[in-house]
Image (tube, rainbow, N blue to C red):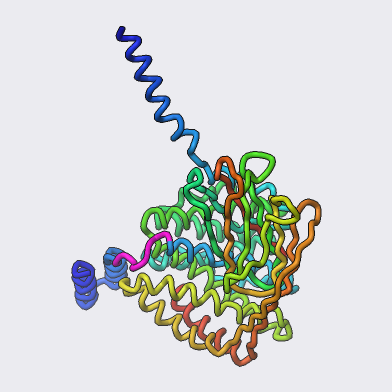
Amino acid sequence: MKKIILTISFLSLLVFVAPEVSAQCDADEHAEACIPNLKEGFNFVKSYEIDGEDGDRNKVEYSYVFAKGTQYMLNLCSGSDDTDGIVVSLYNSSRKLVSTSDANGKLYSAIAYPCNATGIYYISFTFKGSSKYCGGAVLGFKR
Amino acid sequence: MKKGTLILMAAVLLYSCNSEQGSEEQAIQDSLDNVTVEAPAISEEVISDIVQQIPSPLEISVLIKESGSDYDKSILNDDDNASKYNSNYSRALNLGIYGTDLGYTNIYEQNQDAVGYIGAVRDLADGLNIGQFFDFSTIRKLATNSSNLDSLLLITTKNFNKINAYLQDQKRSDQSILVLTGGWIEALHVTCKVYEKNTSNKTLREKIGEQKIILEQIQLLLSLFESDPNIKELGGDLKELQTAFDKIEIVNTYAESTFKEVDGVLVIEDNSTSTVNITDENVSEITRITESIRTKIIN
């Protein structure tokens, strides 16, 4: 009887804890794994964690000062072959859209931006049909 | 704040006793380190967002090398100075300065000098109890071989990013901002010095003018920690620099961008432009004020 109670207690615990565990997002790990994806010649600058908190958060945003004459590259990683619905969009300091990875009917995992206007840019990550709402990205630059 | 004021007064009193100069200075520095810094009026998250904006000084080092300028160690802070920095304030600022110098020596593949700067960074990081984030043995190993440049740049950038994140997690954003400020001042100083020898280089001149945007962000960050007398003074010094930058105009013209796919990468074609209106007189003024602020920091 004691064994049965223990087993039931253990299984009940699993039922409550398991969704928590599966929902955990190791965005840092995704960002780290993304570094080798930077194309040759690009110097690593920053990594970004993208945690959509299981769908509770619909946007994760960072900003960076991009400089004229410098080419930047943003790579997205989600732990799978595609971006798992993660979209990156770039906005200028006036919040005007510069570009988005949601283009040509697909979601690109890498965008390159040869900057022609120095200023603060917003790097905005959103989700489009994502299953895990979790990923990482890296920013690199080259002259 | 009351506690901070009392500690500060005690430090001043101690100084006025005029006994052994060295130990007194240390006592004052220790007291200033212990001054309670009031929590900033905005959240750590917002501070972190602004900190994230500041570009890596490495971008400027790459630009300088690309301009064809020769490597010049004399414009950098001497790595032997590291032992002089005994307060957390000066350690944090000079950690940033040495970080930029290390990046500069790495970009120019000056292995011997890089080893000296790695030592300086290690000493200051240890002094701030953040030495655990620098993998010094790996960095030193990579620095001795020019073919490891990419790995070296990657690991040093990652280490500095980790420091930033850790300091912010530990509610030590003031120190994180000082590291960042030191790194930025050194990058501006190096750019100004290189430009002095190459005044026909329009890209370098514009790069100096563009720093107006960064300075505004740094001033904003420093203003959040003005309850620290050291930071307040630094902010005051940078205010003078900001006045010089106020004379520079950055004109942005927006045009919708286009894009194309190249090897699976979405390549944006930026049709917007920015123009920096800056004269040689503006650069001279910025160079002079930057030099004066930097001299105060490194001595």
Q: Position of residue A30 (x, y in %)?
A: 58, 44
Q: Position of residue A32 (x, y in %)?
A: 59, 46
The residue lying toward the viewer, choosing from B116 and B174, is B174
Quarter of the rendering containing residue A92: bottom right
Which contiguous range is marked in magenta?
B38-45
Examine the residues drawn in magenta and state their main secondary structure.
Answer: loop
The residue lying toward the viewer, choosing from A11 and A110, is A11
For this view, does B183 lie left or right of residue B28? Answer: right
Q: Position of residue B52 (x, y in %)?
A: 52, 62
Give me the residue at 55% from left, 76% from top.
Answer: B213
For this view, does A44 lie left or right of residue A132? Answer: right
Give me the residue at 72% from left, 69% from top.
Answer: B257
Q: Position of residue A5 (x, y in %)?
A: 32, 13
Q: Is residue A75 visible?
A: yes
Say above or below: A18 vs B281: above
Quarter of the rendering containing residue B42: bottom left
The quadrant of the picture occupied by the N terminus of chain B is bottom left
Q: Is residue B299 visible?
A: no
Q: Is residue B44 magenta?
A: yes
Give me the residue at 53% from left, 55% from top.
Answer: A59
How many marks the image carries: the answer is 0
Q: Is residue B139 magenta?
A: no
Say above or below: B20 vs A36: below
